[in-house]
Amino acid sequence: MPDMERVIFTKEMKKEYTILVPTMLPVHFKLMLNIMREYGYRVDLLENSGKQVVDCGLRSVHNDTCYPALLVIGQMIDALESGKYDTHKVALLITQTGGGCRASNYIHLLRKALKKSGYSYIPVISLSIGGLEKNPGFRLGPMMLHRIFYSLIYGDLLMLLANQCRPYELTEGAADALVDQWVARLSEEMKGRGPVQYKRVLASYQEIIKDFAALPRYEGEKTRVGVVGEIYVKFSPLGNNNLEEFLLSEGAEVVVPGLLDFCLYCLYNILNDINLYGGKSKLSTSFYSYLYKFLLKKQEDMIRAIEAEGTFRPGSRFEHTVSLVKGYIGHGVKMGEGWLLTAEMLELIEQGTPNIVCTQPFGCLPNHIVGKGMIRVIKRRNPQANIVAVDYDPGATKINQENRIKLMLANAQRQTMNSEPPETEPALPWLRADERYDLGDGILSENEISAGFHGEESRIS
C-alpha cells in the first residue's frame, strides 16, 4: 500500500482518540497499558472473543494468511463493528517485527482489511523496536520504555507463580485474585515520570513471592505440561482455544516459558547479526548491547529472588537456554521463533517437564521447521520427552485439538507409572555414523536431519 494512504496518528489525536490493543498476554498487557495511560494515552485492551472474531477475520483476511493475523485483525474489526467505540475517535495498535516472518505484513493486511470494511480513515500505529513507521502522536520515551520493561518482568513473575499455585489452590480463583491485586498495586507503584527505583522493584519481588507462597494449597504434585510454540498461539487464550484452562481441567500443572526470553532472543539475534554482518552504527550497537545486558541482569535478579524464597521453581537463565541448542540447531535459524522454540522444549525437559504441547498456526512454515521438524531429534536424544504438536487454524476443531492433547496426557500417566524410561529408537541401518553436518553451533547427523524433516522411511542417496 502506498505511503500516501497511511493515516498518521497526530499529537492532536493523542488527546481524544482511544487506542485499541489486541489481547495476547492479559497480565503483561494490563500492566503495560496502565503505564501508557499514565503517559497520557487513552488505551483499551480488546477482550472480545468467540466465533464472530474468527468470522470477521475470515471475511477481512485471506484464509491462507497465518492464523494469528486472522485473529488479531478479526478481533479489531469485530470491536469496531460492535458499536462500543466511535470509529472516528479510535486508533489501532499492532506490532511490526520487521523480520522474514509474515508478521511483518500484519500492519499492511490490517490497513487493507480496514479499507475493505469501510474504515480506511482509522489510523494504525506500528509498534516495533526498529521504529519502522513514525507517528507524531505516539512515542515511547526512555522513561516510559523503562517502566514497560519492568512491567514485562513483573508479568513473567506473576504468570510463573500463578501457574505453580493454580492447580493446587484450596480456594478456586485465589491465585487469579492475587494476580489482579498485584497488577493494581504494581500499576500504582510505577506511576510517575522519573526513573523506577530498583530497590523498590527488588522489594516487590520478595513481597509478590511471599504472598503467593502463603496461598493455601493442596499437597502433592500434578503432571506438569509445558506450552511452547509461535508466540501468539502460545500465550493468547483466543489463539490456542483456552489451552491453559483445558490443561488445568485435565488435572495438569501448566508451565509456560516467559515473554522476557522472547525479547532477549530478539536482541540476541540483532547482536549476532551485527557481529556477523556489521551494518549498524556504534551508537545503535551500544544501545542493543546495553538493553540485552540490562534485561539479562533483571532476569537474574528475579530468578535469585525465587531461589532465595525456596517455594517455587524459577525458569532458566537465558544464557543457559542459548547453550541448550548446541548440537541441535544453529543460532542462525531465526525466522519466527527460530532456535528459541527448540531451546524452550529442551529447557522444559531439563527442568523435569518432558510433557510438552507445541502450539503452531497451521501453515506457519518457520515454526513447523523449528517446532515439529525438531521433535523427532529431541525425542531420540531425550527418550523421556513426550511432545505433541497441535495446529491451530479456522478449520481445526477444538475437539480434535483436545483429543491429541489427551493422548499426550495419557502417555504421560503411563510413563509416570513405569519407572523404566522408554528405549531410544534404534539407528537406521543404511545411515553411517560419519555422515554429519556442521551447523556452526554444533553437529547434527544426516539421519537426524532426514528423519526430523522427512520421516524415518527417507533414505539418504
Image (cartoon, grey):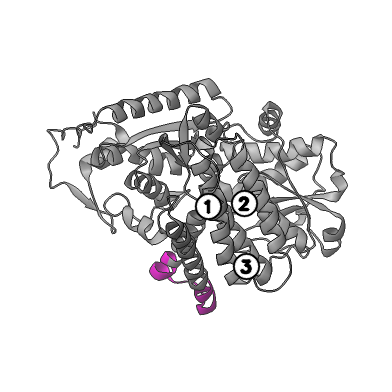
- Amino acid type shown at disc 1: Leu
For the point 25% across and 31% down, the residue is 456
Q: Are marks 2 and 3 in contact (CB under 8 Å)?
A: no
List the residue tagged with mark 2: 28
Within 10 angstroms of label 1, few (less than 14), some, or many (20 or more) residues?
some
Q: Are marks 1 and 2 in contact (CB under 8 Å)?
A: yes
Which sits in the foreground, 405 or 415? 415
Q: CA distance from mark 3 to mark 1?
A: 16 Å
Residue 220 relative to residue 148: left or right: left
Q: CA distance from mark 2 to mark 3?
A: 14 Å
Within 10 angstroms of label 2, few (less than 14), some, or many (20 or more) residues?
many
List the residue tagged with mark 1: 259
Q: Is residue 287 positioned above or below 16 on the image?
A: below
- Amino acid type shown at disc 3: His
Which sits in the foreground, 243 or 428? 243
List the residue tagged with mark 3: 146
Location of residue 376 (image quadrant): top left
Question: In the rendered structure, which segment of residues is drawn in magenta?
Answer: 272-287
